[in-house]
């Protein structure tokens, strides 16, 4: 049951996005990996493990009064869609290699199905005025943002030297739904589920 209520203040705007949740066993394993390197890599912000997710579409500031139409459009995207399997892959970064903006963990598995789902969602929301990002879709789980420095004795080898090569535990899961998230700035965890859309 979702605690989020949008029935009041319909003229208010909320920052929304659509994503795949990361199950608890993956969250906890990624948290342990992140904790191993937090003392060696200085990022401005480490993602709370409960906020780990794979973004499908960022919607931005959205009128609360439009959420009902959005929910209807997102339900249409699940029609006849089948569950699929994902698993964690390697580490990656966005931005300059020596000072990355984002540290992320990649995913592999049924990537074609993931891309198809993302396209369906973008198509379903386009009629409501939401637009896809111009850059190609690149699914990932954000672990940390804004590298400030660290591991000063090994700058020539970069941050990948201190990232754990092995992933402990089961690293795969079945994707059976996606969620609409609202961002709650200043709270921990920062993302709250507005609604869940299960595959039929």
Image (spheres, helix red, strand yellow):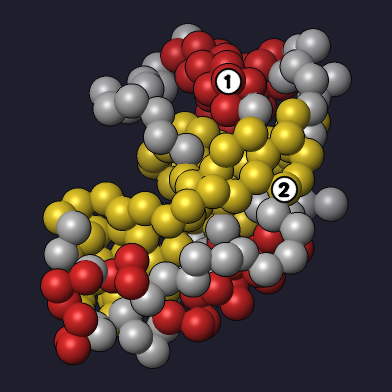
Residue at 59%, 50% in the rendered image: 88
Q: Is residue 191 visible?
A: yes
Residue 172 badge: 2
Query: Depth check: 115 or 199 in front?
Result: 115
Counting from the top left corner in percent of width and height, residue 51 is at 57, 61
Q: Quadrant of the C terminus?
A: top right
- Expressed as whole percent of the image width and height from the top left, the position of residue 117 reads 60, 21
Question: Would you place residue 54 above or below residue 31 in this image?
Answer: above
Disc 2, SS: strand
149 left or right, relative to 61: left
According to the picture, the residue beneath numbered tag 1 turns out to be 112
Q: Quadrant of residue 60?
A: top left
Question: Can you see residue 177?
Answer: no
Relative to 49, is 5 above or below? above
In the rendered structure, which disc, 2 or 1, sits on the residue that comes first in sequence? 1
Structural distance between the alpha carbons of marks 2 and 1: 16 Å
* Residue 92, percent from left and from top: 37, 53
Relative to the observer, which residue lies in front, 78 or 22? 22
Residue 122 rendering spot, x and y as whole percentages:
48, 19
Question: For residue 195, which quarter of the picture?
Answer: top right
Q: Give the residue at x 37% y 22%.
A: 132
Image position of 39 with respect to 146: above or below: below
In the rendered view, tell whether residue 74 sits above or below residue 93.
Answer: above
The local secondary structure at tag 1 comes to helix
Nearest to the observer: residue 187 or residue 85: 85
Query: Which residue is at 38% across, 89% downward?
Result: 39
Is residue 184 shown left or right of residue 148? right
Q: Residue at x 84, y 52 (%)?
A: 1
């Amino acid at each position: 049951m979702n605690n989020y209520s949008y029935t009041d203040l319909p003229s208010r705007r909320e920052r929304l996005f659509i994503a795949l949740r990361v199950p608890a066993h993956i969250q906890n394993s990624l948290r342990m990996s992140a904790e191993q390197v937090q003392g060696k890599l200085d990022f401005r912000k480490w993602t709370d493990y409960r906020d780990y997710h794979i973004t499908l579409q960022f919607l931005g500031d959205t009128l609360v009064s439009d959420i009902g139409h959005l929910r209807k459009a997102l339900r249409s995207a699940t029609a006849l869609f089948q569950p699929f399997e994902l698993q964690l892959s390697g580490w990656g970064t966005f931005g300059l290699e020596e000072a990355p903006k984002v540290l992320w963990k990649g995913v592999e598995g049924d990537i074609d199905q993931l891309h198809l789902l993302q396209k369906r969602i973008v198509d379903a929301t386009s009629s409501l005025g939401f637009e896809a990002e111009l850059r190609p879709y690149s699914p990932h789980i954000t672990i940390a943002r804004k590298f400030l420095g660290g591991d000063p004795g090994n700058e020539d080898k970069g941050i990948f030297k201190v990232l754990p090569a092995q992933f402990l535990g089961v690293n795969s899961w079945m994707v059976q739904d996606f969620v609409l998230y609202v961002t709650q700035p200043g709270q921990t965890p920062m993302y709250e589920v507005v609604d869940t859309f299960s595959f039929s």
